[in-house]
Image: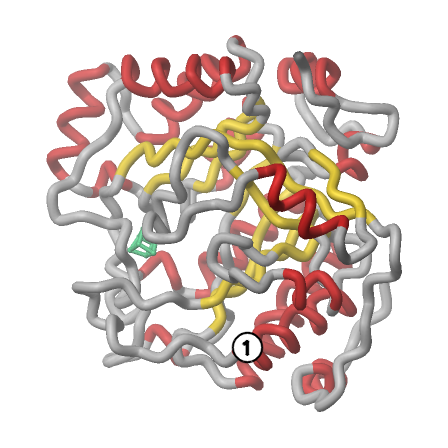
Amino acid sequence: MPSLPLSEVLRLLSLEELPELFPSGRVVSYSRNLFIPLSNACRNACAYCGFRSEKPEIMPEAEVLKLLRAGARHRCIEALFTLGEKPEEVPEIDSQLSRMGYSSSVEYLYHLCEHALELGLLPHTNAGVVSYGELRSLAEVNASLGLMLESASRRLCEPGMPHEHSPGKHPRHRLRLIRDAGRLRVPFTTGLLIGIGESTAEIAESLLALRKLQEKYGHLQELIIQNFKPKPGTPMQHHPEPPLELMLRAVHAARVLFPGAGVQVPPNLNPGFERFLVHGANDLGGVSPLTVDHINPEAPWPEEESLRARVESLGLRLKLRLPIYPEYVKRGWYSERVGEVIHRYATQHGFARALA
Ligand code: SF4
Protein backbone atom coordinates (compact mmCIF):
# COMPACT_ATOMS: atom_id res chain seq x y z
CA MET A 1 0.00 0.00 0.00
CA PRO A 2 1.98 3.07 -1.17
CA SER A 3 1.78 6.30 0.86
CA LEU A 4 -0.40 9.09 -0.47
CA PRO A 5 0.47 12.78 -0.26
CA LEU A 6 -1.88 15.19 1.52
CA SER A 7 -2.36 17.09 -1.75
CA GLU A 8 -3.90 13.97 -3.35
CA VAL A 9 -6.38 13.50 -0.50
CA LEU A 10 -7.28 17.19 -0.67
CA ARG A 11 -7.85 16.81 -4.40
CA LEU A 12 -10.22 13.88 -3.74
CA LEU A 13 -12.09 15.97 -1.17
CA SER A 14 -12.63 18.82 -3.61
CA LEU A 15 -13.71 16.88 -6.73
CA GLU A 16 -16.63 18.55 -8.48
CA GLU A 17 -17.70 15.36 -10.29
CA LEU A 18 -17.53 12.18 -8.26
CA PRO A 19 -17.05 8.99 -10.26
CA GLU A 20 -19.37 6.04 -9.68
CA LEU A 21 -17.22 3.56 -7.81
CA PHE A 22 -19.71 0.78 -7.42
CA PRO A 23 -20.11 -1.47 -10.44
CA SER A 24 -23.33 -3.42 -10.74
CA GLY A 25 -23.46 -6.71 -8.84
CA ARG A 26 -21.03 -5.69 -6.09
CA VAL A 27 -21.81 -6.63 -2.51
CA VAL A 28 -23.11 -4.28 0.16
CA SER A 29 -22.87 -5.77 3.65
CA TYR A 30 -24.65 -5.24 6.95
CA SER A 31 -24.71 -6.87 10.36
CA ARG A 32 -27.78 -7.95 12.33
CA ASN A 33 -27.05 -6.66 15.77
CA LEU A 34 -28.29 -6.13 19.26
CA PHE A 35 -27.38 -2.71 20.66
CA ILE A 36 -26.46 -2.79 24.36
CA PRO A 37 -25.93 0.69 25.86
CA LEU A 38 -24.02 -0.61 28.86
CA SER A 39 -23.38 2.73 30.56
CA ASN A 40 -24.22 6.37 29.88
CA ALA A 41 -21.46 7.51 32.24
CA CYS A 42 -18.42 9.02 30.57
CA ARG A 43 -15.32 10.89 31.68
CA ASN A 44 -15.58 13.07 28.55
CA ALA A 45 -18.14 15.76 27.78
CA CYS A 46 -18.28 16.27 24.01
CA ALA A 47 -20.32 19.32 23.01
CA TYR A 48 -22.53 17.30 20.62
CA CYS A 49 -23.19 14.25 22.78
CA GLY A 50 -26.74 13.17 23.56
CA PHE A 51 -25.70 9.80 25.03
CA ARG A 52 -23.79 10.77 28.16
CA SER A 53 -26.00 11.55 31.14
CA GLU A 54 -25.62 13.50 34.37
CA LYS A 55 -27.62 10.65 35.96
CA PRO A 56 -25.01 7.95 35.41
CA GLU A 57 -26.13 4.35 35.18
CA ILE A 58 -24.59 1.02 34.33
CA MET A 59 -26.80 -1.85 33.22
CA PRO A 60 -26.99 -4.67 35.77
CA GLU A 61 -25.95 -8.13 34.64
CA ALA A 62 -29.52 -9.51 34.80
CA GLU A 63 -30.74 -6.82 32.40
CA VAL A 64 -27.88 -7.47 29.96
CA LEU A 65 -28.63 -11.20 30.08
CA LYS A 66 -32.29 -10.55 29.33
CA LEU A 67 -31.33 -8.47 26.29
CA LEU A 68 -28.81 -11.05 25.08
CA ARG A 69 -31.41 -13.84 25.31
CA ALA A 70 -33.93 -11.72 23.38
CA GLY A 71 -31.24 -10.96 20.79
CA ALA A 72 -30.52 -14.65 20.34
CA ARG A 73 -34.27 -15.33 19.88
CA HIS A 74 -34.44 -12.59 17.21
CA ARG A 75 -31.53 -14.22 15.34
CA CYS A 76 -29.13 -11.34 16.01
CA ILE A 77 -25.51 -12.31 15.39
CA GLU A 78 -23.64 -9.32 16.80
CA ALA A 79 -23.85 -8.08 20.40
CA LEU A 80 -22.74 -4.45 20.20
CA PHE A 81 -21.58 -3.19 23.60
CA THR A 82 -21.38 0.59 23.76
CA LEU A 83 -20.52 2.70 26.77
CA GLY A 84 -19.02 6.03 27.72
CA GLU A 85 -15.28 6.21 28.24
CA LYS A 86 -13.89 4.97 31.58
CA PRO A 87 -17.26 5.11 33.35
CA GLU A 88 -15.53 4.02 36.56
CA GLU A 89 -14.08 7.55 36.80
CA VAL A 90 -17.64 8.57 37.77
CA PRO A 91 -17.83 7.78 41.54
CA GLU A 92 -21.42 6.35 41.48
CA ILE A 93 -20.44 3.88 38.76
CA ASP A 94 -17.20 2.95 40.51
CA SER A 95 -19.18 2.06 43.67
CA GLN A 96 -21.76 0.11 41.66
CA LEU A 97 -19.02 -1.87 39.91
CA SER A 98 -17.34 -2.59 43.27
CA ARG A 99 -20.64 -3.79 44.74
CA MET A 100 -20.96 -6.17 41.76
CA GLY A 101 -17.40 -7.40 42.41
CA TYR A 102 -15.55 -5.70 39.52
CA SER A 103 -12.58 -3.36 39.68
CA SER A 104 -13.20 -1.80 36.25
CA SER A 105 -15.77 -1.54 33.47
CA VAL A 106 -13.51 -3.63 31.22
CA GLU A 107 -13.51 -6.47 33.78
CA TYR A 108 -17.34 -6.34 33.81
CA LEU A 109 -17.47 -6.17 30.02
CA TYR A 110 -15.24 -9.23 29.73
CA HIS A 111 -17.69 -11.20 31.82
CA LEU A 112 -20.69 -9.97 29.77
CA CYS A 113 -18.94 -10.81 26.50
CA GLU A 114 -18.49 -14.36 27.82
CA HIS A 115 -22.28 -14.52 28.37
CA ALA A 116 -22.84 -13.30 24.80
CA LEU A 117 -20.55 -16.00 23.39
CA GLU A 118 -22.28 -18.69 25.46
CA LEU A 119 -25.59 -17.57 23.94
CA GLY A 120 -24.14 -17.74 20.41
CA LEU A 121 -23.73 -13.98 19.87
CA LEU A 122 -20.49 -12.40 18.68
CA PRO A 123 -19.45 -9.35 20.73
CA HIS A 124 -18.18 -6.13 19.18
CA THR A 125 -17.22 -3.58 21.83
CA ASN A 126 -16.64 0.13 21.65
CA ALA A 127 -15.41 1.12 25.11
CA GLY A 128 -13.54 4.31 24.25
CA VAL A 129 -9.85 4.70 25.04
CA VAL A 130 -8.58 1.80 27.17
CA SER A 131 -5.07 0.58 28.05
CA TYR A 132 -3.06 -1.89 25.97
CA GLY A 133 -3.69 -4.62 28.57
CA GLU A 134 -7.43 -3.93 28.61
CA LEU A 135 -7.56 -4.03 24.83
CA ARG A 136 -5.74 -7.36 24.82
CA SER A 137 -8.20 -8.84 27.29
CA LEU A 138 -11.24 -7.54 25.34
CA ALA A 139 -9.77 -9.04 22.16
CA GLU A 140 -10.00 -12.52 23.76
CA VAL A 141 -13.81 -12.30 23.90
CA ASN A 142 -14.71 -10.02 20.97
CA ALA A 143 -14.96 -10.75 17.26
CA SER A 144 -13.77 -7.20 16.57
CA LEU A 145 -13.36 -3.94 18.44
CA GLY A 146 -14.08 -0.34 17.54
CA LEU A 147 -13.25 3.25 18.32
CA MET A 148 -14.13 6.26 16.20
CA LEU A 149 -11.11 8.48 15.61
CA GLU A 150 -13.69 11.19 14.79
CA SER A 151 -10.93 13.63 13.91
CA ALA A 152 -7.16 13.87 14.12
CA SER A 153 -7.49 17.61 14.72
CA ARG A 154 -5.94 18.84 17.97
CA ARG A 155 -7.63 22.19 17.31
CA LEU A 156 -11.00 20.59 18.17
CA CYS A 157 -9.68 20.08 21.73
CA GLU A 158 -8.97 23.78 22.27
CA PRO A 159 -11.16 26.08 24.39
CA GLY A 160 -14.54 26.73 22.80
CA MET A 161 -14.24 23.64 20.54
CA PRO A 162 -16.33 20.44 20.80
CA HIS A 163 -13.64 18.32 22.50
CA GLU A 164 -12.49 20.95 25.01
CA HIS A 165 -13.83 18.91 27.94
CA SER A 166 -13.00 15.48 26.50
CA PRO A 167 -9.48 14.34 27.38
CA GLY A 168 -10.08 10.99 25.69
CA LYS A 169 -10.85 12.68 22.36
CA HIS A 170 -7.31 13.96 21.97
CA PRO A 171 -6.12 12.36 18.71
CA ARG A 172 -2.90 11.23 20.40
CA HIS A 173 -4.86 8.83 22.65
CA ARG A 174 -7.23 7.62 19.93
CA LEU A 175 -4.47 6.95 17.42
CA ARG A 176 -2.47 5.17 20.15
CA LEU A 177 -5.37 2.81 20.80
CA ILE A 178 -5.96 2.17 17.09
CA ARG A 179 -2.22 1.42 16.73
CA ASP A 180 -2.36 -0.94 19.72
CA ALA A 181 -5.20 -2.82 18.03
CA GLY A 182 -2.98 -3.22 14.99
CA ARG A 183 -0.11 -4.57 17.11
CA LEU A 184 -2.53 -7.07 18.65
CA ARG A 185 -3.97 -8.05 15.24
CA VAL A 186 -7.50 -7.11 16.21
CA PRO A 187 -9.93 -6.52 13.32
CA PHE A 188 -10.88 -2.93 13.95
CA THR A 189 -13.67 -0.50 13.06
CA THR A 190 -13.02 3.21 13.18
CA GLY A 191 -14.12 6.32 11.36
CA LEU A 192 -14.67 10.03 11.17
CA LEU A 193 -17.43 12.24 12.50
CA ILE A 194 -18.00 14.88 9.84
CA GLY A 195 -19.35 18.34 10.54
CA ILE A 196 -18.20 19.13 14.10
CA GLY A 197 -16.11 22.15 13.11
CA GLU A 198 -13.19 20.50 11.34
CA SER A 199 -11.77 21.92 8.08
CA THR A 200 -11.47 19.98 4.84
CA ALA A 201 -7.70 19.84 5.40
CA GLU A 202 -8.32 18.28 8.81
CA ILE A 203 -10.59 15.63 7.25
CA ALA A 204 -7.74 14.85 4.84
CA GLU A 205 -5.23 14.65 7.71
CA SER A 206 -7.55 12.35 9.68
CA LEU A 207 -7.94 9.98 6.74
CA LEU A 208 -4.19 9.97 6.18
CA ALA A 209 -3.45 9.28 9.87
CA LEU A 210 -5.67 6.18 9.64
CA ARG A 211 -4.22 5.16 6.31
CA LYS A 212 -0.71 5.22 7.80
CA LEU A 213 -1.81 2.73 10.46
CA GLN A 214 -3.50 0.61 7.81
CA GLU A 215 -0.31 0.54 5.74
CA LYS A 216 1.61 -0.73 8.76
CA TYR A 217 -0.87 -3.17 10.35
CA GLY A 218 -3.67 -3.86 7.83
CA HIS A 219 -6.23 -4.23 10.63
CA LEU A 220 -8.82 -1.58 9.72
CA GLN A 221 -11.77 -3.63 8.53
CA GLU A 222 -14.23 -0.75 8.37
CA LEU A 223 -14.26 3.03 8.10
CA ILE A 224 -17.46 4.74 9.23
CA ILE A 225 -18.14 8.12 7.70
CA GLN A 226 -20.70 9.54 10.09
CA ASN A 227 -22.51 12.81 9.71
CA PHE A 228 -22.96 15.07 12.73
CA LYS A 229 -26.61 15.37 13.84
CA PRO A 230 -27.47 18.09 16.36
CA LYS A 231 -29.02 16.82 19.59
CA PRO A 232 -31.50 18.97 21.52
CA GLY A 233 -30.22 20.25 24.84
CA THR A 234 -26.52 19.98 23.87
CA PRO A 235 -24.15 22.94 23.38
CA MET A 236 -24.11 22.18 19.62
CA GLN A 237 -27.88 21.87 19.21
CA HIS A 238 -27.94 24.76 16.69
CA HIS A 239 -24.77 23.78 14.84
CA PRO A 240 -25.55 22.98 11.16
CA GLU A 241 -25.32 19.47 9.74
CA PRO A 242 -22.53 18.90 7.19
CA PRO A 243 -23.46 19.45 3.53
CA LEU A 244 -24.34 16.31 1.58
CA GLU A 245 -21.59 17.08 -0.97
CA LEU A 246 -18.94 17.02 1.75
CA MET A 247 -20.22 13.67 3.04
CA LEU A 248 -20.20 12.22 -0.47
CA ARG A 249 -16.64 13.39 -1.08
CA ALA A 250 -15.48 12.02 2.27
CA VAL A 251 -17.03 8.63 1.46
CA HIS A 252 -15.43 8.65 -1.97
CA ALA A 253 -12.01 9.58 -0.51
CA ALA A 254 -12.31 6.83 2.13
CA ARG A 255 -13.10 4.31 -0.63
CA VAL A 256 -9.97 5.33 -2.54
CA LEU A 257 -7.71 5.36 0.55
CA PHE A 258 -8.99 2.09 2.02
CA PRO A 259 -9.61 -0.10 -1.01
CA GLY A 260 -9.98 -3.38 0.87
CA ALA A 261 -12.05 -2.11 3.81
CA GLY A 262 -15.74 -1.60 4.35
CA VAL A 263 -16.81 2.02 4.05
CA GLN A 264 -19.93 2.49 6.12
CA VAL A 265 -22.58 5.17 6.10
CA PRO A 266 -25.28 4.66 8.75
CA PRO A 267 -28.58 4.26 6.85
CA ASN A 268 -30.66 5.59 9.75
CA LEU A 269 -28.78 8.92 9.67
CA ASN A 270 -28.86 9.16 5.88
CA PRO A 271 -32.34 8.49 4.48
CA GLY A 272 -30.95 8.80 0.92
CA PHE A 273 -28.09 6.37 1.56
CA GLU A 274 -28.23 5.05 -2.03
CA ARG A 275 -26.12 7.99 -3.27
CA PHE A 276 -23.31 6.96 -0.93
CA LEU A 277 -23.41 3.40 -2.23
CA VAL A 278 -22.97 4.68 -5.77
CA HIS A 279 -19.89 6.71 -4.79
CA GLY A 280 -18.07 4.10 -2.77
CA ALA A 281 -19.80 3.07 0.47
CA ASN A 282 -20.22 -0.71 0.69
CA ASP A 283 -21.50 -1.31 4.20
CA LEU A 284 -24.63 -0.28 6.06
CA GLY A 285 -23.39 -1.17 9.55
CA GLY A 286 -25.45 -2.73 12.27
CA VAL A 287 -29.19 -2.95 11.78
CA SER A 288 -31.20 -4.26 14.69
CA PRO A 289 -34.56 -6.03 14.60
CA LEU A 290 -34.88 -5.48 18.35
CA THR A 291 -33.09 -2.44 19.81
CA VAL A 292 -32.87 1.23 18.80
CA ASP A 293 -29.69 3.16 17.99
CA HIS A 294 -29.11 4.49 21.52
CA ILE A 295 -26.63 7.11 20.25
CA ASN A 296 -29.22 8.47 17.78
CA PRO A 297 -32.54 7.27 19.25
CA GLU A 298 -34.51 9.71 17.09
CA ALA A 299 -33.37 7.86 13.93
CA PRO A 300 -34.94 4.39 13.51
CA TRP A 301 -33.16 1.76 11.43
CA PRO A 302 -34.82 0.74 8.17
CA GLU A 303 -36.18 -2.82 8.17
CA GLU A 304 -33.95 -5.44 6.63
CA GLU A 305 -36.38 -6.24 3.82
CA SER A 306 -36.69 -2.61 2.80
CA LEU A 307 -32.89 -2.25 2.88
CA ARG A 308 -32.57 -5.29 0.64
CA ALA A 309 -35.09 -3.95 -1.88
CA ARG A 310 -33.40 -0.55 -2.00
CA VAL A 311 -29.89 -2.01 -2.42
CA GLU A 312 -31.05 -4.45 -5.11
CA SER A 313 -32.81 -1.64 -7.01
CA LEU A 314 -29.29 -0.24 -7.67
CA GLY A 315 -28.15 -3.56 -9.12
CA LEU A 316 -26.13 -4.37 -5.96
CA ARG A 317 -26.36 -7.39 -3.64
CA LEU A 318 -27.04 -7.10 0.09
CA LYS A 319 -25.20 -9.66 2.25
CA LEU A 320 -25.31 -10.37 5.95
CA ARG A 321 -21.86 -10.26 7.55
CA LEU A 322 -20.42 -11.01 10.95
CA PRO A 323 -18.97 -8.26 13.17
CA ILE A 324 -15.62 -9.53 11.89
CA TYR A 325 -15.19 -8.90 8.16
CA PRO A 326 -14.71 -11.83 5.76
CA GLU A 327 -11.03 -11.10 5.13
CA TYR A 328 -10.21 -11.43 8.84
CA VAL A 329 -12.31 -14.58 9.18
CA LYS A 330 -10.09 -16.03 6.44
CA ARG A 331 -6.92 -14.73 8.13
CA GLY A 332 -8.00 -16.35 11.43
CA TRP A 333 -7.67 -13.11 13.41
CA TYR A 334 -9.69 -14.26 16.44
CA SER A 335 -9.24 -16.18 19.67
CA GLU A 336 -10.15 -19.84 19.94
CA ARG A 337 -13.31 -19.23 21.99
CA VAL A 338 -14.57 -16.53 19.61
CA GLY A 339 -13.67 -18.80 16.70
CA GLU A 340 -16.07 -21.48 17.98
CA VAL A 341 -18.99 -19.06 17.50
CA ILE A 342 -17.64 -17.59 14.25
CA HIS A 343 -17.54 -21.07 12.72
CA ARG A 344 -21.24 -21.60 13.45
CA TYR A 345 -22.15 -18.68 11.21
CA ALA A 346 -19.38 -18.16 8.67
CA THR A 347 -19.86 -19.22 5.07
CA GLN A 348 -16.83 -20.37 3.07
CA HIS A 349 -16.44 -16.76 1.89
CA GLY A 350 -16.46 -15.40 5.45
CA PHE A 351 -19.93 -13.80 5.31
CA ALA A 352 -22.73 -14.89 7.64
CA ARG A 353 -25.25 -17.60 7.11
CA ALA A 354 -28.53 -16.80 8.84
CA LEU A 355 -29.36 -19.60 11.25
CA ALA A 356 -32.95 -20.80 11.45
S1 SF4 B 1 -16.89 10.20 24.48
FE1 SF4 B 1 -18.80 9.49 23.55
S2 SF4 B 1 -20.19 9.12 25.28
FE2 SF4 B 1 -18.49 10.37 26.04
S3 SF4 B 1 -19.23 12.45 25.90
FE3 SF4 B 1 -18.07 12.04 24.01
S4 SF4 B 1 -19.60 11.31 22.50
FE4 SF4 B 1 -20.53 11.21 24.58
- Identify which residue, 10 or 312, lies in the foreground: 312
Q: Give the residue type that dot 1 points to.
A: Leu
Colouring method of the image: secondary structure
Location of the N terminus (image quadrant): bottom right
Q: Is residue 350 left or right of residue 117?
A: right
Q: Residue at x 82, y 24 (%)?
A: 347
- Give the percent coordinates (x, y) of residue 64: 34, 20
Q: Quadrant of residue 337?
A: top right
Q: Residues within 10 Å of mark 1 (few under 14, many from 20)?
A: few
Q: Is residue 124 left or right of residue 338?
A: left
| Above-or-below relation of 331 to 278 | above
- Give the percent coordinates (x, y) of residue 313: 75, 54
Q: Is residue 82 left or right of residue 41?
A: right
Q: Secondary structure at mark 1?
A: helix
Q: Is residue 11 left or right of residue 99?
A: right
- Identify which residue, 317 or 235, lies in the foreground: 317
- Give the percent coordinates (x, y) of residue 133: 49, 34
| Above-or-below relation of 311 to 336 | below
Q: Residue at x 48, y 53 (%)?
A: 268
Question: Which residue in the structure is indicated by mark 1?
Answer: 244
Tally of marks: 1
